[in-house]
Image (spheres, helix red, strand yellow):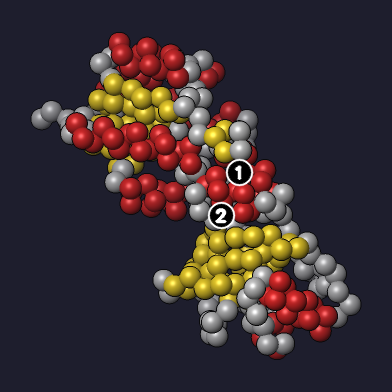
Amino acid sequence: MREHKTSVALGSFDGLHAGHQSVLQNALSFCEDGLLPLCLLFDVHPQTVLRGSPPPLLMAPDERDARLRAMGFSLRTVSFADICGMEPEAFVRVVLSDTLHAGAVSCGYNYRFGKGGSGDAACLRRLCEQNGIRIRVCPPVESGGEAVSSTRIRTLLESGACAEAAELLGRPFSFTETVVHGAENGRIYGYPTINQHLPQGLVTPKFGVYVSQTLVDGTWYDSLTNIGTRPTLPDETPVCETHILGVDRTLYGDAITVALRRYLRAEKKFASLEEVFRQVRLDLAQAGLS
């Protein structure tokens, strides 16, 4: 039985930012010719193998995969360690042509592949043409005169510029974590919060208070989120605390998504919990949420 030809999107796709969307949309455009959209993914981030550790991610891999499937892509995951030593010619012939049955390929202008990253987009174009594979190389997607990239977005989030990062991502940076028990000081003072650990492996936004939105039972609610070590309390473990407007029930054990929309202020150390929650009232007013 002859395998159906595919349209393969190539890239790491961490964050699915505006640059990635260009590559993905180009891959989808080949569907008009009857090709099946497929995304080639790696079992680990390439830097895990090349440099010993991955960069902090912009999106959990399971969320990335769910979004890609929702766009219509089938996913094929391969071991990066198994293919990183391939010569460029072998990658195109064995992986793209023989394994994925690529009839078309889409990649970014800065795509690298093959042993030691020896293959670039121009090399991929030449090899694809030799193997009868159509190819589209996407030019850089720019914002503010600079190319959109995962590295640039990480830097913005680490500096607290989450509104600027959202422009490059095409949506606010968000994460999903299980709600855990806390001291419940917020409930005592009339500002109940959900407590979540910071996601392992994801970029850590700048510590401080954010205007946010929180997804509960399919509905987005306005919220106020503090990320940091809570310097007023004797606890050095970074946590995420979110006060959700319009939700007055415990969510312990639920996986809740928090999206950061705007950085409001840095963390402060207060003399008492009373002062903490006086500041919360001020923060809500400044955020336009009171």
Name which residue lies at 55% across and 67% down: 213
Local crowd at mark 1 within 10 Å, few (<14), some, or many (≥20)? many
Label 2 vs 1, first from the N-terminus: 1
Distance, label 2 to label 1, CA atoms, is 10 Å
- Residue 39 at x, y = what percent? 35, 37
- The answer to whether any part of residue 162 appears in the image is yes
- Residue 204 at x, y = what percent? 66, 53
Name which residue lies at 44% across and 72% down: 219
- Report the label total: 2
According to the image, label 1 marks what residue?
153
- Residue 47 at x, y = what percent? 58, 33
> Is disc 2 in contact with disc 1, using a CB cutoff of under 8 Å?
yes
Local crowd at mark 2 within 10 Å, few (<14), some, or many (≥20)? many
Residue 89 placement, left or right of 114: left
The vertical placement of 190 against 131, above or below, is below
Quarter holding residue 22: top left
Residue 178 placement, left or right of 265: left
Q: Which mark is residue 173?
A: 2
Instruction: Specify the amino acid type for callout 1.
Output: Ile
Name which residue lies at 52% across and 19% down: 117
- The answer to whether any part of residue 44 appears in the image is no
